[in-house]
Amino acid sequence: MGGSHSREDLEISDEEEEEEEEISDYEDAEDPDYQPSRTPSSSVDEVDAKLKALKLKYPNKNSSLKNAVKLYLHIGGSTSNAKWVISEKLTSYSFIKASQVADGDDPHGDSTDSLWVLKIGSKIQVKIGMDMQLKMLGDQCRVDFVSEGVWALKFFNEEDYRAFVKKFQDCLFENTYGCEATDDNKLKVYGKDFIGWANPDTADDSMWEDDLFESPSSGTPLRRSQDLREEFEEVAGGGGGIQSLTLGALDNSFLVSDSGIQVVKNFSHGIHGKGVYVNFSGGRIKGGSSSSTTTPNKALLMRAETNMLLMSPSNEGKPHSTGVHQLDIETGKIVSEWKFEKDGTDITMRDITNDNKGAQLDPSGSTFLGLDDNRLCRWDMRDSYGIVQNLASASTPPVLNWTHGHQFSRGTNFQCFATTGDGSIVVGSLDGKIRLYSINSMRQAKTAFPGLGSPITHVDVTYDGKWILGTTDTYLVLICTLFVDKDGRTTTGFQGRMGNKISAPRLLKLTPLDSHLAGVDNKFHGAHFSWVTEHGKQERHLVATVGKFSIIWNFQQVKDSSHECYRNQQGLKSCYCYKIALKDDSIVDSRFMHDKFAVSDSPEAPLVVATPMKVSSFSISSK
């Protein structure tokens, strides 16, 4: 089932002649299957027209009531009975320190005395943070947010609205970085080259626009009629719950479960079929000299997708691993277990990835990249002389050869990484920083983007290196790496220092209602661009997973500065225009298949969505 984002941002009616405290003329009506649409139906258009034609009546503003607002609550979730109701016809808000919250009333319990809290009347006390998912609707003088429910504040004039937004953003900055939102502190946090991130209204967005229109084949025309359609759903084989999804660009893709690896077939309409199954026995991978391991948390295809490297955490609950298992896909057997070692000392890695976007298609590939908290390196399965190691006669696990890289002294706290088509590297960190390394050096980043306060849990990059997509728990951050160098050439932050001509990033977020429906413990994970491995082709969509939702954004739409989502916003531009593929169970992973599987009547290759027990394939129709 598919859909787009919800309509809780339709105008709230202020007609108050009814006896009941509800807005009878406004109903956030949605299908029971949760398939809201950004393009309003004719009935919704009629409701909008009726609301705009009303003579709005506000209660007399009490001159003694400071920060007066009207408070609404959204009820009914995604059912056909969903609507906004008036919670408080007239109340007030205040920004207070957690130390001012009455004993026992701390809304989170873990707040320190120095954190800012938003207090609204006697009903709401919420710590100010990105998890509030606050959405600005400037044309309605209104903000929506999440706090154990979905709420809306309606202000009585634009001046009051703007004053609230300014104070909220200042408090958010202070809660995030631990210092007041002064110009000097913003300069310290972001750096002089990134001051446009602190003041995005003054940032240069020309690079977003230049890339948007630079090539007729660079993206999909914006069609409101594009829609998601589930082609089929298949129960996974093998009896174990799916833990990860590894897509191939050739004949097969792979479902890694807690009992083995299921090989499935690639088709133009998705993946399905049950092929070879490689079993794990008792939590161990068969083969190798030391087969004790947990379920692999990373599977990496190599050598024209005939081999797979499987990396498993050494200790439960931690991602670090002391080595990898090499699986021969054609025989279905583990042929070796490799150790990570540097200068005779065992070391760990937290992530591995291919040398570049298309490296898994190279039949002779023997190298791959590794990442640990403070290490970035390239591993070679050949020995130090470039000779293939004899796995059959090895009495001890063969050792991977550290060909080059860098072991940082401390403080980098690397979390995830990805590569471009030419092998440049992007690395995300615990402090939210995103670093760009050229193909020539892993020692010093060419560009280091400042963090926005949330750890980067996953990162992806386009084939051409022009765009970075970082995943955090509550939002995605899209960064443009393009800049004009001193010689007047347009290049990327992988090739040189970007100086101060840096575009502000854009955030991709859920609406407050969708965030609430996704669940309090559900977080964004694994955001990806659609998959291309050729020069001149442009990724068309972005996909991320949160709870039972697979969220899809149109890449061209996000880049378009005139897009409706960006109107009447203050601060960093946030895009709420997306499609939702909803499943009945928590989604493990969502990925677009390789671009070669796109068919003539679809602008995109199929989207594959995996839950623990099922795999579904969706198409994006252009009809």
Image (spheres, rainbow, N blue to C red):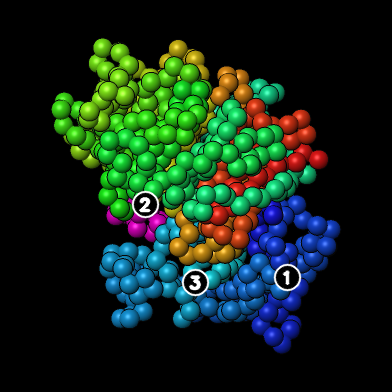
Q: Are marks 3 and 1 in contact (CB under 8 Å)?
A: no
Helix, strand or loop at label 1? It is: loop
Given this view, does label 3 or label 1 mark the residue nearer the observer?
1
In which image quadrant can residue 392 be found? top left
Helix, strand or loop at label 2? It is: loop
Residue under label 1:
80
In which image quadrant can residue 366 be found? top left
The answer to whether one can see residue 412 in this image is: no
Residue at 65 percent across and 73 percent down: it is 76
Mark 3 residue type: Glu
Residue under label 3:
148
Alpha carbons under labels 3 and 1: distance apart: 21 Å
Q: Main secondary structure of the magenta part?
A: helix
Task: Name the residue nearer the viewer: 226 or 313.
Answer: 313
Which stretch did the figure color magenta? 169-181
Which quadrant of the rendered structure holds the N terminus? bottom right
Mark 2 residue type: Gly
Q: Say left or right for 236 vs 322.
A: right
Q: Is residue 92 above or below residue 399?
A: below
The mark that comes first in sequence, 3 or 2, is 3
Residue at 57 percent across and 29 percent down: it is 249
Residue under label 2:
282
Residue at 51 percent across and 64 percent down: it is 519
Mark 1 residue type: Ser
Q: Name the outermost residue toward the front.
A: 393
Q: Is residue 174 magenta?
A: yes
Alpha carbons under labels 2 and 1: distance apart: 47 Å
